Structure formats: C-alpha cells, structure tokens
Image: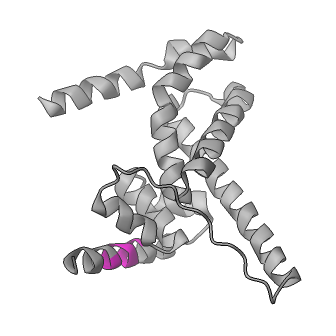
Amino acid sequence: MVAQVIAAHERFLDDDSPLVERAKAGDMQAFQQLFQRHQKRVFGLVYRLCNDTSYAEDLAQEVFVQVWHKLQSFRGESKFSTWLHTVATRVAIGELRKQQRWFRRVRLQFADETVPEQSVDAPADLGELDKHIQRLPEKTRWVFVLHALEGLRHDEIAEQLNIAVGTSKAQFHRARGLLEEWLSNE
C-alpha cells in the first residue's frame, strides 16, 4: 500500500511538463503550482545541507527565485524535479561556501574574538538518525545527504561539489562509519 502511494506521488511529480511550459510562457499560477509541489523536498534538501531551519527557509526561497530566472534554460532533457534538485544543490552549496568565506575573513580580521556558532533550530520531530546526520562534518554531511538520501551517484556529487569521485566515495564511507558508531553507542 505504501509503495503504491509513493509510486502515485512520483508519477504526479513527473507530470510537471505542462506546468513548466506554462511557467516558461510567464504563467505565475503555473509556477506557483510547481512551487507548491516541490517546496517541501527543496526545503528538506537544503536543510540537510545547512543544518539551520531559518537559513534553509531563506535558501529554499532563493532556489525558487533562481529557478524562475533560469526556467528558460530548462530544456526538458531530464525531469523538472531532477533539474530543480540540481539548482537547489548548487544554490545551497554556493551560499554555504560564501558564508564560509565570510566567516574566514571575520576570523582573520578579529582573530582574538570568537565567532558565534551557527544556531541550530532542528524541528522537534527529527529522528535520531537525522540528529546524527547533522553532527557529521559539513562536507561529509553534504556527500551523505546527496548520495544516501537524495540518490545521486558519486560522479554526479563530484560534479556538483567540484570534488573528485574518490573523495565523494571516501566522504560517504566516513559518514557511514561515523553514523554506525554513533548509533551503536546509544
């Protein structure tokens, strides 16, 4: 029963073509429908990458702004959801890298002052696994989320994160090892 519901939902999401074409023609209602269909998945992805609810909301909003601006470049060679996922990953990681550069500059400028830690407003209903995923080192978490939770291949992850395929595999192996260790100690 659950598998049938999931399959029906995936077929529903795969049928974005008419909405995409209408949105490309400037139909804001069609774009709003695309937004409503995909906002939770985009938020989930960027949340797992940044580990901050408020920041993830901002990033998800930025993703859809970018999608609106880049919609004409979507050629339909893949599913819209696949293209959207790629845009979301690139926007989130790009923004996280900008944030890292800013923090590095602040640390260098004010070396004797401490930089406040990023706040974590995780939803109360996150399971133990999600809590442990958030404990992973940032780049290790990125690879784990993209491979284990989003289903990307290591070559796709390597391209999106601008790392070697072997690095992606090593980071995933590291994440799995840490998660297994943490979960077995509970």
Expressed as whole percent of the image width and height from the top left, the position of residue 146 reads 45, 56
| 3 versus 162 height, above or below | above
> Can residue 163 be spotted in the picture?
yes
Expressed as whole percent of the image width and height from the top left, the position of residue 130 reads 36, 59
As for residue 173 lying within the magenta part, the answer is yes
| Left or right of 39 in this view: 59 | right
**Which of the 4 image quarters holds residue 127?**
bottom left
> Can residue 78 be spotted in the picture?
no
Instruction: State the extent of the magenta-drawn residues as a range.
Output: 172-178
As for residue 124 lying within the magenta part, the answer is no
| 124 versus 102 height, above or below | above
Expressed as whole percent of the image width and height from the top left, the position of residue 24 reads 67, 17
Q: Quadrant of the C terminus?
A: bottom left
Mainly helix, strand or loop, the magenta region? Answer: helix
Taking depth in this image into account, of 63 and 120 the one nearest to the observer is 120
**Residue drawn 46% across the image and 55% down it:** 122
Furthest residue to the left?
Answer: 1
Taking depth in this image into account, of 148 and 166 the one nearest to the observer is 148
